[in-house]
Image (spheres, rainbow, N blue to C red):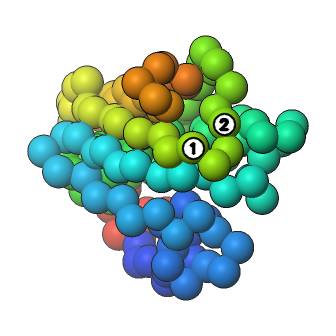
Amino acid sequence: MNSLRSDGLCFVCGQLNPLGLRLRVEGRDGRCSFEWTPDPRYQGWEGILHGGIVTAVLDEAMAYAAMSVAGHSATVEISVSFHRPVMTGREVQVRAEVESNRGRLTLTRGEVLQEGVLMASGRARFLAVRDGEG
């Protein structure tokens, strides 16, 4: 990879990916939040959102929070705790924020809520990536 650019095919936020989630995500001032209603096609067990999708959505929110303070960044470590099953067909609220930003390393935390209940939480470390480094 020679340059960091979006081709619109990101699984989570790519608007040109016909199989993706097509979420509209934006980070500002070290924070990111959005609402989304998971479609049953992304379930694991019947009516329950697949844990990999929960993780991908948390990663995206935390990445956008990190990038809002550090520029282009790549996930170097992520951990997710699942507190309750996230149900499909019901809106979720996804929130993330930067905990610290030192040099090229940004630490974040995020959470997924459904009907005001904490369903999943995560933490991630991001490394600021310079164009041409990828």
**Is residue 3 visible in this depiction of the protein?**
no
Residue that extends furthest to the top in the rendered view of this protein: 83
Above or below 3: residue 56: above
Q: Which residue is mark 2?
A: 87
Cα gap from disc 2 to disc 1, whole angstroms: 6 Å
Q: Residue shown at 19%/40% (left/top)?
A: 30
Q: Which mark is residue 45?
A: none
**Is residue 134 visible in this depiction of the protein?**
yes
Foreground pick, 66 / 39: 39
Residue that extends furthest to the right in the rendered view of this protein: 45
Residue that extends furthest to the left in the rendered view of this protein: 29
Q: Is disc 2 in contact with disc 1, using a CB cutoff of under 8 Å? A: yes
Q: How many marks?
A: 2
In this rendering, position of residue 50 left or right of residue 127: right
In this rendering, position of residue 52 left or right of residue 9: right
In this rendering, position of residue 79 left or right of residue 109: right
- Residue type indicated by callout 2: Met
Pinpoint residue 59: horizontal percent, then vertical percent.
50, 43
Pinpoint residue 131: horizontal percent, then vertical percent.
35, 69
- Residue type indicated by callout 1: Arg
Question: Which structural element holds mark 1?
Answer: loop
Q: Residue shown at 41%/73% (left/top)?
A: 4
Q: Residue shown at 67%/44% (left/top)?
A: 88
Pinpoint residue 94: horizontal percent, then vertical percent.
41, 39
Pinpoint residue 77: horizontal percent, then vertical percent.
54, 32
Q: Which residue is mark 1?
A: 90
Q: Residue shown at 41%/39% (left/top)?
A: 93
Question: Which structural element holds mark 2?
Answer: loop
